[in-house]
Image (spheres, rainbow, N blue to C red):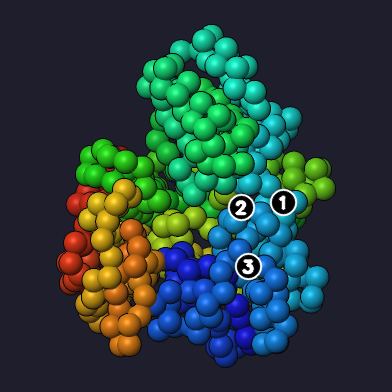
Amino acid sequence: MKLMVIGGGGREHAIIKALKKNPAVEEIFALPGNGGIAADATCVPIGAKDIPAIVEFAKENAIDFAVVAPDDPLVLGCVDALNAVGVACFGPTADAAIIEGSKAFSKDLMHKYGIPTARYETFTDLDAALSYLDTQSAPIVVKASGLALGKGVIIAETIDEAKQAAREMMAEGKFGESGKCVVIEEYLTGPEVSVLAFTDGKAMVPMVSSMDHKRALDGDRGLNTGGMGTVAPNPYYTKEVADRCMEEIFLPTMRAMNSENRTFRGCLYFGLMITPDGPKVIEYNCRFGDPETQVVLPLLKTDLLTIMQAVSAGTLSEVDVEFYDGCACCVVLASEGYPASYEKGYPITLPETAPDTEIYIAGAKRDGDTLLTSGGRVLGAVARAEDLPAAIEKAYALADQIQFDNKYLRKDIGQRALRALS
């Protein structure tokens, strides 16, 4: 089989490494991929949002199956366009990807179908948003409704901060069209949990839960990032919580999308808060999370391609999806200064990986045989072990062996999870 994976980050590298394990796979193309992915797939310099070029490439190269990983091409209809020329895909069509593409849509969906989430109001008029904020108390959350590279959520500590966020989004165009509509919602408290789930619109199969670390600095301080590391499973996600989520959130969301004639087939990401009133949805994503994928896929025992093909064909219930016991940890190695300004172009020295460890490259390019840093998040050092302390220790030992100038990493990935276990 010839496969095509759209995207070029650490998530895509993890997906490609998992797909390669299937003996039927002859070749994998990554569009556009990156310098590290080039060791595991043929990289093609076509951008993830260049849908006409993606479709043409698939036709010319007789692609058997495609995985569309990032949010932008999904929302833009990449799966629809590939399906139209007979290419089977893993990923939702555009009418289902709106669950991430429009926070206003997803909040209204939850309200309509009784899925637990924060109280909210949606605004397209700045004056109305400011007047509403005068009636609220802080902290409060202001969200750009559209896609904003994970940066469109502001947790305002004061009402003045919230008003400033609304002005920047709605009047000053901070996030372009994505910020013309804003969602203002109550601030929830409790542990956060990420759960990725396979679904074909008929069956829902949650993967191992995970805990992300968004802040740039130790102790959960500093700027928000795309994620500085993850551990799995999340200790706050107990069997009791999992059962409630399945009955109150996961299955109702699948059924709600079906009722709206927007059947979701792919990976549905649930960002959850375990509040004193029970689990509530913070956000949906229409695809694998990054860097959650980097700890979840190493714990997947069942062949990934088999699952993805079943999701595409609507036969997920016929696949026995199994996971390994144990835990995994991903430590992100970033360029010093990320997520603000940082230098790039430094050579990367990689060690040989030991059993149950992986290096997933996110931001690197090739110059001949040399791998150079080319992004803020450069790579993820990942390890699997029988328990969480061992997985964390192995991941940091691997991270210590990876060298490049201006290397930066958090030193406390997984510590919050360990405290929850103690």
The residue that disc 2 covers is: 286
Earlier sequence position, callout 2 versus callout 3: 3
The residue that disc 1 covers is: 96
Callout 2, which amino acid?
A: Cys
The residue that disc 3 covers is: 50
Residue in the image at 57% along x and 90% along y: 26
Residue in the image at 28% along x and 83% along y: 370
Residue in the image at 74% along x and 41% along y: 256
Mark 1, secondary structure of its residue: helix
> Relative to 420, is 127 on the left or the right?
right
Is residue 351 shown above or below 71? Answer: below
Q: Quadrant of residue 121?
A: top right
> Relative to 90, is 48 on the left or the right?
left
How far across and how far down the image is residue 69, in percent?
Answer: 57, 64
> Relative to 398, is 361 on the left or the right?
right
Which of labels 2 and 3 is toward the front?
A: 3
Mark 2, secondary structure of its residue: loop
Residue 129 showing in the rendered view: yes
How far across and how far down the image is residue 358, in percent?
Answer: 34, 72
Which of labels 3 and 1 is toward the front?
A: 3
Q: Residue furthest top?
A: 135
How far across and how far down the image is residue 9, in percent?
Answer: 44, 66
Callout 1, which amino acid?
A: Ala
